[in-house]
Amino acid sequence: MIELAFSILASDFAHLADEVAAAERGGGTMVHVDVMDGHFVPNITFGPAMVKALRRVTKLPLDCHLMIENPDQFIAEFADAGADFVGVHAEACRHLHRTLQLIEQHGMRPAVVINPATPVEMLIEVLPMVHHVLVMSVNPGFGGQQFLPLALDKIEHLAELRTEMGLNYRIEVDGGIAHDTVARVVEAGADMLVAGSAVFSPGRTEENARELLRSAREAGAALDKAGEAADGSAGPARTSSED
């Protein structure tokens, strides 16, 4: 199933509970929390306190994307705050395998993230450990950036590896996801879509979320139909992963 993880980085912080509720009514299935430290990326955003506040106002899964140095030092705090998924950057982890183990040991689902310049091959050894792989389709640090098409090849490669390795990790994509890009990432194999600027807008958040998710699921349905038609020869065009 294709899911929408709405990024609160683009929301109105003064009315955060209302913003989250509107995005959820529009079909959003998880809250994406962009955690930045001003060192790993050139911006500062949220920490565990924001996660704890969100936990009080929604039952949706909290998908925390840690764009920080030394993430191991903060895993326990995010667990205590109520995070469900924690994604760490391969580029930020000296001992990535250990960090992913630590996330799981604290009762959360681990994810690994790669920047636009990082090859998928760096993740081969940890793919069996993760709930999902997050492919950055912009350089991390700021919202509202233009989608980088090179992410499509990475998504396709990850989908192929998932089949070849017999795994069921999901593929998330973050950066520039909007009506003009959502079909392409779904066709490439992504099934968790992070969107902020395309969702949050005064008076239109619920409608925006609903329309974006509809476009994504229509693209997915068309791809599944094409795969069924070719099933006798090449098999389905897209592999869907469920929890």
Image (cartoon, helix red, strand yellow):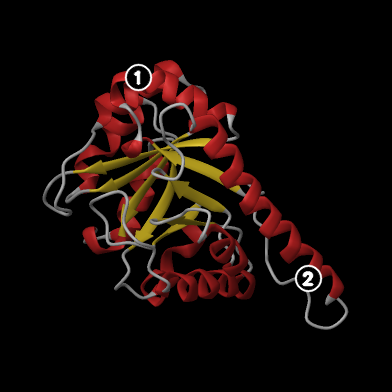
Q: Amino acid at mark 2?
A: Gly
Quadrant of the image occupied by residue 174? bottom left
Q: Is residue 13 above or below residue 241?
A: above
Q: Earlier in the sequence, mark 2 or mark 1?
A: 1
Confirm or deny contact between disc 2 and disc 1 (CB under 8 A).
no
Residue 108 in sight here: no
The residue tagged with tag 2: helix, strand or loop?
helix
Of residues 145 and 67, the one nearer the viewer is 145
Q: Position of residue 135 (x, y in %)?
A: 41, 62
Residue beneath label 1, please?
Answer: 15
Q: Nearer the viewer, mark 2 or mark 1?
A: 1
Query: With 107 as the anchor, is 209 left or right in this view?
Result: right
Q: Is residue 99 above or below residue 73?
A: below
Q: Amino acid at mark 1?
A: His
Query: With 129 as the anchor, is 136 left or right in this view?
Result: left
Residue beneath label 2, please?
Answer: 227
Name the residue furthest front.
203
Name the residue furthest bottom.
233
The residue tagged with tag 1: helix, strand or loop?
helix
Residue 184 in sight here: yes
Q: Is residue 167 above or below residue 124?
A: above
Q: Residues within 10 Å of mark 2 (few under 14, many from 20)?
A: some
Q: Separation of disc 2 and disc 1 at Cα?
A: 43 Å
Q: Residue at x 67, y 59 (%)?
A: 219
Query: With 238 as the anchor, is 228 left or right in this view?
Result: right
Q: Residue at x 48, y 53 (%)?
A: 178
Q: Residue at x 53, y 51 (%)?
A: 192
Q: Position of residue 45 (x, y in %)?
A: 21, 38
Q: Position of residue 17 (x, y in %)?
A: 41, 19
